[in-house]
Amino acid sequence: MSHRNSSAPTVILPTHTAGLFRAAVERAVALLRAGQLVALPTETVYGLAANALDARAVARIFKVKGRPVNNPIIVHVASVAMAKRCVSRWPAAARRLAVAFWPGPLTIVLPRSPEIPGTVTAGGETVGVRWPSHPFIQAVIEACGFPLAAPSANLSTQVSPTSARHVLKSLGGKIPLIVDGGPSPVGIESTVLDLTVRPPRILRPGMIHEESLLAVWPECGVRSAQCGGSAVVAGPQAALRSPGQLRKHYSPRAGLRILPWHDDQELVAQLSMLNVQLTGTHVIAHTHIPSVGGFGRVCVIPHDAAAFARAIYAELHRCDEEGAELIVVEQLPETTAWRAIADRLRRASA
Ligand code: TXA
Ligand code: MG
C-alpha cells in the first residue's frame, strides 16, 4: 500500500463543464476505491472523503487532519436507502426529517449498523448520516456505490474550507486530489441532530435551525446542547458527544473579537482599549460600516444570515492570508436565523 509523503503533489481538478465534471468524478472514484482520500465540494464546506466502509482509509483521515481519535466522522450518502444501510434503526422521525431536509445541510445521529467501522464512529454506537445536496459529491457517492466518511477538509481546529483553494492551503501535499466545485453555497457546517435521545438534541447548530425542525416536526421538543447546559463529554475515554461543541474550534490564526458599535467613534474607542494597531485590525461589518481609514481592511457582508454564512469563512481565511493580527466582527443579531453563525464566531474567538 502506498503512503503519501508530505512532498506528494496535490492535483486540483475543475468541474465547470460537463466533460470536466465527468472526468473529475472518475478520478475521485478511482482514488476512493483504492482507499485514498479526496477533498470534495459539498454545499456546506469542503469535505475530506474516504470510503466509509474501509477502516484503513478512514484512519488516514484522522492522520492527515491531526484529528483527535475520539471525534466521530459524518457518513455521507446519496439516497435514503443508503442511509438506512448505515444505521440499525430508521425511526419515523428520520423519515420525516429526510423528506423535509435531504438532500441538504442536516446530519442525523442514529444507532450505527455493524457495517460502519468503529473508526468512523470513534468507537461509539451511533453514526451521523447526511445526504448532501451538492451535485458533485452526489455523483461520486452514486458511482462509488459506498457511503463516504468526510469531515471538513482542514487541519483540526482550523476554519473550515469553502473553496478548493482553502483546502490546498491546509492539506496541499498531503492528499492526491482536490476537486474544485466552486464556493460552498451554504458556507458553514451542517446542523447535527441527535435522534438517539429524547427529546432530540441539536449537537451542532447549522443553517437548518430549531424553528425549521419544529415546522416539520412540531412535537419533537428539540433542544440545543448549549441550552441544556448538560455535560458534553460523557467521560474522558468516551467518544465526544459532538466535538463541534469544543469551545475552541473553527479558529483563524488571528485573534477574533465580536464587538457592538453604532458609529466609528464607538468602534475606535473599543479598539484603543484593546491596545491594538488599526493597521493590523481587519473589520467585518454588516450594518454599521466604518468610514474612518487606517484599518488593515474593512469587509462588508450583507445583513442577511444566509449571505453572511456563505461569506464568513472565506473572509476569515482572507484575513489570515493578509496577516491580520485581530479580526473584529460586528455583533450579530440575536435571532434564530443567525444562531449557528454566532456559535461559530464564538468558538473562533475562544
Ligand atoms: O457540513 C458538514 O457537516 C461537513 C461536510 C463535509 O459534510 N462536515 C463536517 O464534519 O463538518 P466535521 O467532522 O468537521 O464535523 C462533524 C461534527 C463533529 O462535531 C462531530 O463530533 C459530529 O459532527 N459528529 C459526527 N458523528 C457523530 C456522532 N455519531 N455523534 C455525535 N456527533 C457526531
Ligand atoms: Mg470540522
Image: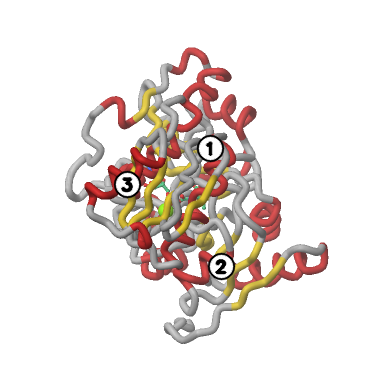
The amino acid on which the numbered mark 1 sits, given as a three-letter code, is Leu
Mark sitting on residue 171:
none
Mark sitting on residue 165:
2
Marks 2,1: beta carbons within 8 A: no
**Precedes in sequence: disc 2 or disc 1:** 1
Q: Which-is-in-front pick, marks 2 and 1?
A: 2
For the point 65% across and 67% down, the residue is 29
**Is there any visible trace of residue 278 in the rendered image?**
yes
The picture places residue 195, in percent across and down from the top left corner, at 43, 30
Farthest residue, direction top: 219
Residue that label 3 marks: 257
For label 3, the crowd category at 10 Å Cα-Cα, with few meaning under 14, some 14 to 19 and many 20 or more, is: some
Q: Secondary structure at mark 3?
A: strand
Q: Is residue 199 above or below residue 314?
A: above
For the point 44% across and 48% down, the residue is 114
For label 1, the crowd category at 10 Å Cα-Cα, with few meaning under 14, some 14 to 19 and many 20 or more, is: many
Q: CA distance from mark 2 to mark 1?
A: 25 Å
Residue that label 1 marks: 106
Q: Which color scheme did the rendering employ for the protein? A: secondary structure
For the point 45% across and 67% down, the residue is 321
Q: Secondary structure at mark 2?
A: helix
For the point 17% across and 48% down, the residue is 236
The amino acid on which the numbered mark 3 sits, given as a three-letter code, is Arg
Horizontal side of 40 relative to 57 (left or right) equals: right
For label 2, the crowd category at 10 Å Cα-Cα, with few meaning under 14, some 14 to 19 and many 20 or more, is: some
Q: Is mark 3 within 8 Å of ligand 2?
A: no
Q: Is residue 318 above or below residue 85?
A: below
Q: Secondary structure at mark 1?
A: strand
